Amino acid sequence: MQARILMAGALFSGALMLPAPPTASITARYKVAQRIQQDVDATALGGGKQGFVVKTTSYVLLTLTDTAGGRSVKVLVDSIHGDSLPPGAPADMLTKATGVTITGFVDPKGKLSNVKASSEAGGLQLSSLVQQLLPPLRSPLKVGDAWTDTTETSNGVASGTMTTRTVTNFKVTGTEARGAVKASKVDGAFSSSIAGSQETPGGSADIEGTGTGTSSYFVAPDGKLLGGTSNTTSNLNVTLAAQGATLPLVLSQSVEITPLP
């Protein structure tokens, strides 16, 4: 039981960025590679330490379209491939994700809202793909710019919900040629607080803890994301009411976004 905690929500959680300047529409394809490692100490239940690694690669099409008061957002999932999946995952979980669309709206300040997926595809929380590609980022960018952003998100997980409040310090640290484009390099350092609950085979579980991480992204002058990475480590406590036990859990995630032709 413990080894499955959080994975449905964790598969597509993270903090990846693409600015949404109000002056142009953008269509772009991306490869999103993720590695998630979960380690839980179930010693309090006599289960010892348990852990597993999940690796997935998603291919998506992002479209931002100018509309009244901002931009409409659409992400089409072309496909998702898994090198390894969580224990007990349905065999067709990734196949069901093909063709799913996620929509939303981003305002001129880069704030994302009204994110909805046409399907959860057998347990995958695909709506958070948009949160990876469109966290708030100021525009235009120039070297030396620095700012702080606070974002709160609430995502469904299997039989439960997770709320994350993240404070990120951004800074434009330089420029770099990405192909024929001179891109701004934006670095971020963030901390988060996490709280939620989930029904598990062992009963109701309350989850709380903190996370820290770093990110680094390259952004074209028109706002198009030209690549990026993010690394996060969360230290959580999972309290099982029926057993009267609290289990320490460490969740580590790395994400790499690569633009495609």
Image (cartoon, helix red, strand yellow):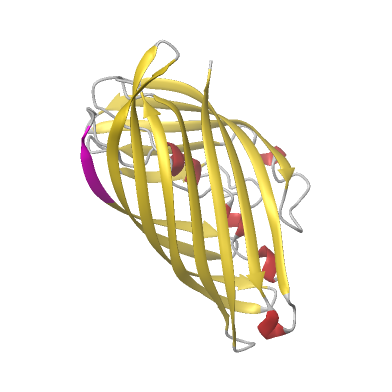
**Side (left or right) of 196 relative to 81:** left
Please say whether residue 97 is visible from this viewpoint: no
At 39% from the left and 60% from the top, the residue drawn is 192
Q: Is residue 210 above or below residue 146?
A: below
Q: Quadrant of residue 7?
A: bottom right
**Where in the figure is residue 26, as x and y percent of width and height?**
38, 21
At 73% from the left and 41% from the top, the residue drawn is 83
**Where in the figure is residue 94, as x and y percent of width and height?**
69, 41
**Where in the figure is residue 230, as x and y percent of width and height?**
47, 43
Q: Is residue 59 above or below residue 215?
A: above
**Side (left or right) of 119 relative to 182:** right
> Magenta stretch mostly in which secondary structure?
strand
Q: Quadrant of residue 203?
A: bottom right
Give the quarter of the figure containing the N terminus.
bottom right
Depth check, front residue: 174 or 97? 174
At 71% from the left and 46% from the top, the residue drawn is 93
Please say whether residue 67 is visible from this viewpoint: yes
Depth check, front residue: 97 or 259? 259
At 75% from the left and 51% from the top, the residue drawn is 90
Furthest-bottom residue in view?
244
Task: Identify the magenta region.
Answer: 144-149
Q: Is residue 150 above or below residue 1?
A: above
Q: Quadrant of residue 245?
A: bottom right
